[in-house]
Amino acid sequence: MSDSPSVPAAVPVVLDVWCELQCPDCRQALDDLHALRARYGDRLELRLRHFPLEKHKHSFAAAQAAEEAAEQGQGWPYVEAVLGRVAELDRGGEAFLVEVAGELGLDAEEFDTALIDGRHILIVDADQAEGKAIGVTGTPTYVIGGELLDGGKSQEGLRERIEEITDRLLA
């Protein structure tokens, strides 16, 4: 309950970002996501959606680790840290994921436990199933305003298209 008069809050436009943390294209897409955050601020909500690809053996564990980071309040910083070091994830696997958590001041022991007990598997599975159901085939893929934009084939022009849709939805 609040004593202040009720003023409807602006509802942000939602951009679902179907991502895989071992994907070099997703790492490259970070620049676009930073630019979108800078341009729209709180008017654009970026939602990470997991779409681990079978060709990357640590992608499923990385998705679970990202969920643990979100639970500990550092979802996006963790995602960006892992994507910035894709080659290290390729080599280090789960130990690398726990190491990054420690570097960010997260509870690394809890990360290790979460990866062992699989507490975030259902979230990752649900995201992947939903992605497949709506036509996601690779990463990064974006969904905004009901439109699916596939960045796995080419990211050229995608940020501009996202901006066009966001501007229209905010108007």
Image (cartoon, grey):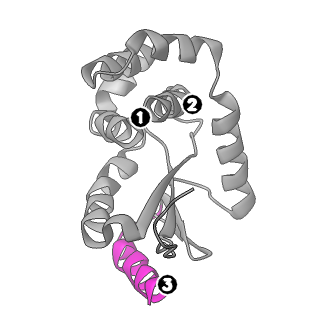
Q: Which residue is mark 1?
A: 73
Q: Quadrant of the C terminus?
A: bottom left
The answer to which of 149 and 40 lies nearer the viewer is: 40
Q: Name the disc covering residue 169, or none.
A: 3
165 within the magenta span: yes
How far across and how far down the image is residue 13, in percent? 49, 72
Q: Chief secondary structure of the magenta span?
A: helix
Image-based side of 73 in relation to 37, left or right? right
User: Label 3's element?
Assistant: helix
Image-based side of 132 in relation to 140, left or right? right
Mark 1 or 3, nearer chain start: 1
- Circle 1: is it few (<14), some (14-19), or many (20+) Cα within 10 Å? few
Q: Quadrant of the N terminus?
A: bottom right
Quarter of the figure with residue 31: bottom left
- Circle 3: is it few (<14), some (14-19), or many (20+) Cα within 10 Å? few
Instruction: Note whether 30 is above or below 87 in the view shown.
Output: below
The residues bearing labels 2 and 3 have C-alpha atoms spaced at a distance of 33 Å
How far across and how far down the image is residue 105, in percent? 28, 21
User: Label 2's element?
Assistant: helix
Q: Which residues are magenta?
A: 153-171
Instruction: Note whether 166 is above or below 114 in the view shown.
Output: below
Residue at 42% across, 38% down: 75
The answer to which of 107 and 116 lies nearer the viewer is: 107
Q: Amino acid at mark 2?
A: Phe
31 within the magenta span: no
Q: Name the disc covering residue 60, or none.
A: 2
Residue at 39% across, 71% down: 43
Mark 1 or 2, nearer chain start: 2
The residues bearing labels 1 and 3 have C-alpha atoms spaced at a distance of 29 Å
Numbered disc total: 3
Q: Amino acid at mark 1?
A: Gly
